[in-house]
C-alpha cells in the first residue's frame, strides 16, 4: 500500500516568534498529517548548523533556534515572551536569547539531564562552543538538553499518531566544527591542516567546478578504525528519526576532492567507503537497509548503481528531472523501491518550474498526465494525482506544491547566496488544511 508524506522544514512552521520551532505549531502540523492519512513528515537537517542546514557544526547537537518558548513557559522556566508578527520568512536573529538565559537561571538539573550530558558528542559540542564562541559550558548543555527533550516529545507524539519522521543527514560537516575539532583523524589532514575540500568537477554550468566548503573523510583511517565514527552517527540519527535520508550517496562510492587552495579543475575522484562500510553498518542489525533513503541524484556512475542495487536501497526520484522520459514514462514502469518527489528542497516549485517550460514541453507534460488519467487544470494537482497512482512505495510532496505556490516560495537556490534561501515559512495553516485534501 502506498504511503504518503509532506516535506516541511522546522523553520518553515508558522510561529509567534520569527522562526518555526518544536512547539505547538509542530504538533498541529502532525495533527493535520494524521487527519489526512499522511504517513511521513520529511524534514531538512535539524542539527546545529549556523542557519545553513547542510553545513553542520555537529551531528548530535540541535539548532538552538528550534527551542519553543511556549513550551519553556509551560514548564515554568520563563514568565512570558514577546510575540512577533507572523511573516512568510523565517527571522534568524538573537530574539530568543534573553528567554533562553531566563530559562537557564530557573532550570533545576534532573537525573535525565545528567544522563543526557553523558553523551560524549554533546559534551564535545559544548566544549567546541566554549572554545569558539566563549559560551559557558553549562549554558550550552542546558540548551541542548531542552532541545533534545522537546524534540523527542514531538517525535513520540508524531509516532503515536502514526506519523513517521524522515530525518536528513548531510554528508560532511563544516571545517570549523565539533566534528573536526574532536575527530581530526577522520578527515584528510596533514600536520594539523586540511588537505582537501569537497566539491564537484567542472561541468556545463561551472567551468571551474564547485567547492562546497567542507572537509572530506579519510577513508584509510575510517577503515582502520572499523568505521566507528560514522556507524555511531547512523545509530544516533535513528534514535532521533524513524528513517534517514542519506545525502550524497554517490560519495559513498567515490567522492570528488579538491586540494585546498585549488579549483575544481585540479580535483579528482577518490574511492569512497563503499561495501566494507555498509557491511559493517548492517552487521549487528541496529541499522537496517529499510531505515535509509538514499539521495543518488546527479552524475551517477555504474558502480554507484551497483552499490545501491547490491543492498536494495530505497532511492529518491525527482519527477521534474524526468522531463526527457515523458514520451515513454508512466506509472506502470516506475520502480516500487522509490520515494517519489515532484521536487525537493533544491528544486523550483511545480508552479514555478512549469512556467519555465517551453510550449512543446508543456504539451508533453499535459499528454503525460492525460495518459496516466490525471486530469486537473492546475498542473500541481495533476502531478499530485500522478504521484498518488505511480508504483513508488512512498510519495512526498512539499507544502509549497500542495499550495501551488510560485518560485518565491522555494526553499533553496543551490549555488546562489541569498537571504531567501532556507527562510520561506507558512504564516498559518489555513490554506494548507484545505489544499492537502487534494493529496489524500
Image: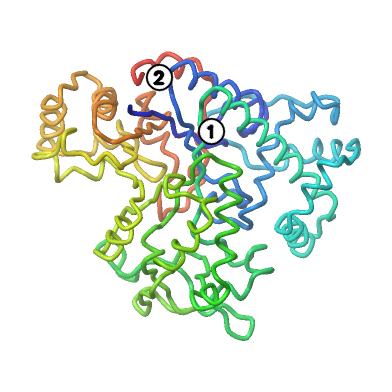
Element marked by disc 2: helix
Task: Say which mark, if any, is on residue 244.
Answer: none
User: Could you say which quadrant of the image residue 331 lies in?
Assistant: top left
Where residue 312 appears, x then y in whole percent?
A: 33, 51
- Viewer-closest of 104 and 204: 104
Query: If the image is split into quadrants, where does the N terminus sit?
Result: top left
Q: Please, is residue 102 above or below residue 248 in the view?
A: above
Which badge, 1 or 2, comes first in the chain's sequence? Answer: 1
Residue found farthest to the front: 284
The residue at the point 78 percent across, 61 percent down is 127
Read off the residue under disc 1: 12
- Viewer-closest of 318 and 121: 121
- Residues under numbered marks 1 and 2 in contact, where contact means CB atoms less than 8 Å apart: no
- Viewer-closest of 159 and 214: 159
The residue at the point 55 percent across, 70 percent down is 226
Q: How is the image coloured?
A: rainbow
Where residue 405 appears, x then y in whole percent?
A: 37, 28
Q: Please, is residue 113 above or below residue 203 in the view?
A: above
The residue at the point 58 percent across, 56 percent down is 233
Where residue 208 appears, x then y in whole percent?
A: 34, 71
Read off the residue under disc 2: 436
Between marks 1 and 2 in the image, the one whose residue lies nearer the viewer: 2
Along the horizontal axis of the image, is 416 left or right of 355?
right
How far apart are the alpha carbons under marks 1 and 2? 17 Å
Amino acid at each position: 500500500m502506498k504511503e504518503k508524506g509532506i516535506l516541511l522544514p522546522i523553520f518553515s512552521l508558522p510561529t509567534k516568534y520569527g522562526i518555526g520551532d518544536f512547539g505547538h505549531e509542530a504538533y498541529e502540523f502532525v495533527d493535520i498529517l494524521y487527519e489526512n492519512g499522511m504517513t511521513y513528515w520529511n524534514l531538512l537537517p535539524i542539527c546545529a548548523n549556523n542557519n545553513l542546514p547542510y553545513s553542520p557544526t555537529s551531528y548530535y547537537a540541535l539548532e538552538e533556534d528550534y527551542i519553543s518558548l511556549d513550551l519553556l513557559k509551560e514548564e515554568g522556566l520563563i514568565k512570558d515572551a514577546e510575540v512577533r508578527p507572523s511573516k512568510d520568512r523565517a527571522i534568524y536573529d538573537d530574539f530568543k536569547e534573553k528567554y533562553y538565559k531566563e530559562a537557564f537561571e530557573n532550570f533545576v538539573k534532573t537525573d535525565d539531564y545528567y544522563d543526557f550530558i553523558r553523551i560524549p558528542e554533546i559534551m564535545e559540542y559544548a566544549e567546541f562552543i566554549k572554545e569558539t564562541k566563549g559560551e559557558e559550558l553549562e549554558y550550552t548543555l542546558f540548551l541542548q538538553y531542552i532541545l533534545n527533550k522537546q524534540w523527542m516529545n514531538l517525535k513520540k507524539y508524531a509516532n503515536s499518531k502514526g506519523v513517521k519522521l524522515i530525518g536528513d543527514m548531510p554528508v560532511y560537516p563544516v571545517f570549523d566544527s565539533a566534528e573536526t575539532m574532536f575527530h581530526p583523524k577522520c578527515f584528510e589532514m596533514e600536520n594539523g591542516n586540511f588537505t582537501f575540500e569537497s566539491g564537484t568537477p567542472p561541468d556545463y554550468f561551472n567551468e571551474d567546478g564547485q567547492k562546497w566548503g567542507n572537509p572530506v573523510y579519510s577513508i584509510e583511517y575510517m577503515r582502520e578504525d572499523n568505521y566507528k565514527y560514522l556507524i555511531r552517527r547512523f545509530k544516533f540519527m535513528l534514535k532521533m528519526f524513524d528513517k534517514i535520508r542519506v545525502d550524497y550517496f554517490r560519495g559513498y562510492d567515490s567522492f570528488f576532492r579538491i586540494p585546498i587552495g585549488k579549483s575544481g579543475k585540479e580535483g579528482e575522484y577518490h574511492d569512497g567507503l563503499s561495501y566494507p562500510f555498509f557491511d559493517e553498518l548492517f552487521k549487528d542489525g541496529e541499522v537496517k537497509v529499510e531505515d535509509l533513503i538514499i539521495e543518488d541524484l546527479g552524475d551517477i556512475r555504474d558502480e554507484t548503481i551497483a552499490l545501491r542495487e547490491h543492498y536494495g536501497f530505497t532511492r529518491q526520484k525527482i519527477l521534474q528531472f524526468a522531463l526527457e522520459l515523458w514520451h515513454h514514462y508512466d506509472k506502470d514502469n516506475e520502480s516500487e523501491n522509490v520515494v517519489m518527489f515532484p521536487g525537493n528542497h533544491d528544486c523550483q516549485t511545480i508552479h514555478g518550474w512549469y512556467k519555465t517550460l517551453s510550449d512543446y514541453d508543456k504539451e508533453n507534460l499535459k499528454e503525460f498526465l492525460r495518459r496516466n488519467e490525471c486530469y486537473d487544470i492546475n498542473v500541481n494537482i495533476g502531478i499530485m494525482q500522478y504521484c498518488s497512482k505511480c508504483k513508488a512505495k512512498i510519495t512526498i510532496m512539499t507544502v509549497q506544491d500542495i499550495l501551488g505556490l510560485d518560485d518565491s516560495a522555494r526553499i533553496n537556490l543551490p549555488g546562489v547566496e541569498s537571504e531567501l534561501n532556507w527562510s520561506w515559512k507558512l504564516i498559518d495553516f489555513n490554506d494548507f488544511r484545505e489544499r492537502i485534501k487534494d493529496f489524500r
